[in-house]
Structure formats: structure tokens, C-alpha cells
Amino acid sequence: MLAPLCLVSEAAELAARRHAGQQRKGRGNEPYVNHLAEVASLLSAATEGTDAELVAAGWLHDTLEDTNTTHEELAEFFGLRVAGLVQECTDDMNLPKSERRWLQIVDCPHKSDSAKLIKIADKISNVRARIFPNPNDEQREELADYVAWAEQVVAGCRGGNAALDAMFDETVAHARATL
Ligand code: ZN
């Protein structure tokens, strides 16, 4: 088992390498790794640095969905809990987007407590990225649509960490104020 700081550092490095060249959706054309850093940081702050595996899973949460990383690899490098958490946060990309979105809403209440925290942190980061200071019609519509869906997903995930729940609500209020 890796020491906590090694686990988090190695997860960050693998995530950065695997997502190299990918851009995140939304404001500022940021590199994808910024999203992962934000999710990991939200999780670390919300749990006051007490759960290195959760933070590592935050860094890695999109590797199965968006890169050629495998569950076996994650289990070997980071252990079964981290690999399992990433798996829980992975959509089946063979399904159409509308179905994946619907499944997130219905599946979230059945996820593990730690996976629920990752889902909320992910939605906070994704809503933030869609907030523009002076949105055009398309940006406004995209944000309104994303927030409405994210609220339904998070409704089935909340209750495990008050700080993260409050951060999500603040982020949604801020988003709505720009609409
Ligand atoms: Zn994500």
C-alpha cells in the first residue's frame, strides 16, 4: 500500500499523463487536468485531508471513461478501493448521452458514500466551468440545462458531507444568478 502522499501524487501524475492533450468543456479552453485538480481539491478540502484514496480517486475519476486506462491497472497501482470508486463514476460510453444522463440520476442513490462525494465534486466543477460572466444565448441555455440535470443527480447523492452539499448549492445559486 502506498503512503497517502505518494498515492495522491502518483494518481495526479497518471491522470495528467493519460488526459494529456484533452481540453475541458466550458470557459477558457482549460486543459482537462484542471478539472481533475479541482475535483480532487474539493474532495480533499471537504474531508479535511483525511481520505487519500478518495482524493486519488478524484484525480482518476475520468480515466476509465475518457482514456485507455483499465480497471486492472488502477487496481494494481492504487488498490481495489480507488479502482472501484473510479468504476462507480464511469458512464457506459456505448449508450447515447440522454440515457447516460438519465442513468446518473437513477443510479446515484445506490452508489457508495465515497462515490457520491466524487459525483457532487464533479458536478460542482462542471457547473463552475459553464458559468460565463456575460453569457450568450447558447452558453445560457447550456448552463441552464446542465444545472437542471446536475441538481437531479446531486439530489440522489447528498447527505454525506455538509461542506460539499453547501458548496454545490452555492455554485448553483451563483450559476442561476447569471441566467
Ligand atoms: Zn469529471
Image (cartoon, grey):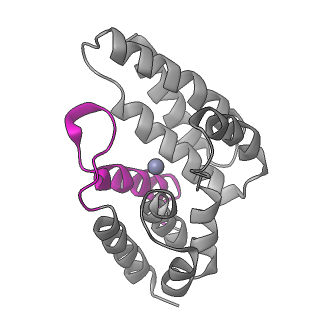
- Secondary structure mostly seen in the magenta stretch: helix
**Seen from this angle, which residue lies furthest right?**
110
Judged left or right of residue 92, residue 43 is: left
Magenta span contains residue 35? yes
- Where residue 150 appears, x then y in whole percent? 57, 31
- Where residue 92 appears, x then y in whole percent? 62, 52
State the residue at coordinates (28%, 53%): 22
Nearer-the-camera pick, 47 or 34: 34
Label count reads 0
State the residue at coordinates (24%, 50%): 31
Judged left or right of residue 149, residue 137 is: left
Magenta span contains residue 30? yes
Which quarter of the figure is the C terminus placed in? top left
State the residue at coordinates (36%, 28%): 130
Q: Which quadrant of the figure has residue 102?
A: top right
Judged left or right of residue 132, residue 177 is: right
- Where residue 33 appears, x then y in whole percent? 30, 56
Q: What segment is highlighted magenta in the picture?
A: 20-49
Q: Which quadrant of the figure has residue 40?
A: bottom left
Nearer-the-camera pick, 30 or 99: 99
State the residue at coordinates (26%, 31%): 27
- Where residue 154 appears, x then y in whole percent? 63, 36
**Seen from this angle, which residue lies furthest bottom?**
1
Nearer-the-camera pick, 74 or 39: 74
Instruction: Give the answer, above or below, for where 165 lies relative to 141.
Output: below
Instruction: Give the answer, above or below, for where 150 lies relative to 115.
Output: above
Instruction: Give the answer, above or below, for where 49 lies relative to 165.
Output: below
Judged left or right of residue 40, residue 163 is: right
